[in-house]
Amino acid sequence: MTFESMREAPAPQVRSWPVDDLPALTPDPFLDEVLHDEPVTRIKLPHGSGHAWLVTRYEDVRFVTSDPRFVREQVAGRSVTSMFPEPVASQTAGLQYIDPPRHTRLRKVVSRAFTTKSMQRLRPMAERTAAELLEGMRRAGPPADLVEHLLGPFPIAVVCCLLGTQGDDWRQWAATAEGALSVAGDKERARAAREVTRKRIIDLLDSRCDEPGDDLTGVLAQAAAAGEITDGEAVSLATAVYVSGGHAVRNNCGSMMYTLLTHPEHLHRLRREPELLPRAVEELLRYVPHRNGVGIPRIATQDVEVGGQMIRADDVVYNSYLSANRDPAVFPDPDTLDFDRDNVAHLSFGHGPHYCLAATMARMEAETVIKSVLDHFPHLQLAVRAEDVEFLSKGPIRGPKSLPVTW
């Protein structure tokens, strides 16, 4: 097919995608359908205006997310078809809605807090915290909610340590975390909790101006003092890391534990072969549908061919990491949880310039959660039927609202 004939070819019919809540961690059948039938298609989501392209194949997703002709900055302030009536992430703060060179400048600063040395400093603290939380659950006795006792507070403790809080100060942050990290429910409560979090972050940054350090607020405070970033950018970046580090890890680890508890043969294998854990975490990251629908779109700045379709300049483009992770051309038998899978090069942390900065930390947290649970509760099992576990609804991230367990 020539370039000119592709320009003249009719575009696919626009498909309506309601992005309804699905039971537990059931893969979205819409994504399965378009990946098989029309991997670069057009969609209309429940909110916003117009339509958008949806890219679903692994190689096509990698292409779009790394090609500079697809940008995010032009999404800000524009009404595009979307899952929610308002953007989940701030369009004026953080790294989500910016492109190079500003994105490169800010990312370079934040990356100083995500060094190998920083992660080595965090792991012992994470392991101690997980052990303390699980001992608290043991004292409470079965049945117990693993989200309440471990999966909720644990990522708050870790991200607070990354920020640079002292000792048990993270417990004060955890007390307001549910409201601050919520994307649904009581908006006034969420607004108040987020304001408390913002004030805490500002206080932390102020306290670090004269205290060099490799924690996040120390890094950001020094960068602001040196004129590399503004004070407002420092606050926004710290807030974005806190929110994503708390909310996403809580739910991703919850989904992993639910998956293991509903795949007892895999759980038993990890008990027998603990050295398999890092590979198992990678396969869980690929296998678990960690979000609903799609995330932040991009805008094409030029006409670009993607997967045999011509995407025109100014078109809106969504990428599906979920479908890419189940592309049978890359992951044979993709709906099977396979700890022996040869290729675990998933896209759960994204790809290209917006690849998740905290991926190493998230992996460490997942490994710590699973290992700590296996060590402390070798006979852990669900206290209810799998189908009776309540999951979050009406939000971008999937995960169990509670996870009742017994031992």
Image (spheres, rainbow, N blue to C red):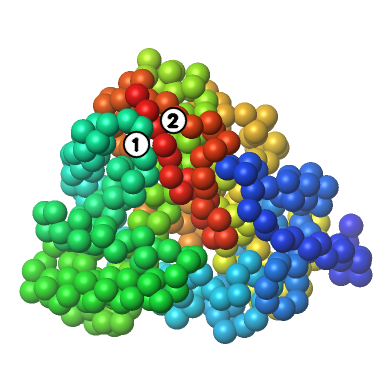
Q: Is residue 250 left or right of residue 5?
A: left
* Residue 97 position in % (x across, y down): 50, 74
Give the secondary structure at mark 2.
loop
**Which one is nearer the viewer's eye here, 293 or 318?**
293
Q: Residues within 10 Å of mark 2 (few under 14, many from 20)?
A: some
**Which one is nearer the viewer's eye here, 131 or 361?**
131
Q: Is residue 123 visible?
A: no
Tag shown at residue 144: 1
Residue pictured at 64% horizontal, 48% vertical:
22
Q: Is residue 43 left or right of residue 121?
A: right
Residue type pointed to by label 1:
Ala
* Residue 223 position in % (x across, y down): 23, 74
Image: 74 above or below 344: below
Q: Residues within 10 Å of mark 1 (few under 14, many from 20)?
A: some
Q: Which residue is under mark 2?
A: 383
Q: Specify which label sits upstream in the sequence, 2 or 1.
A: 1
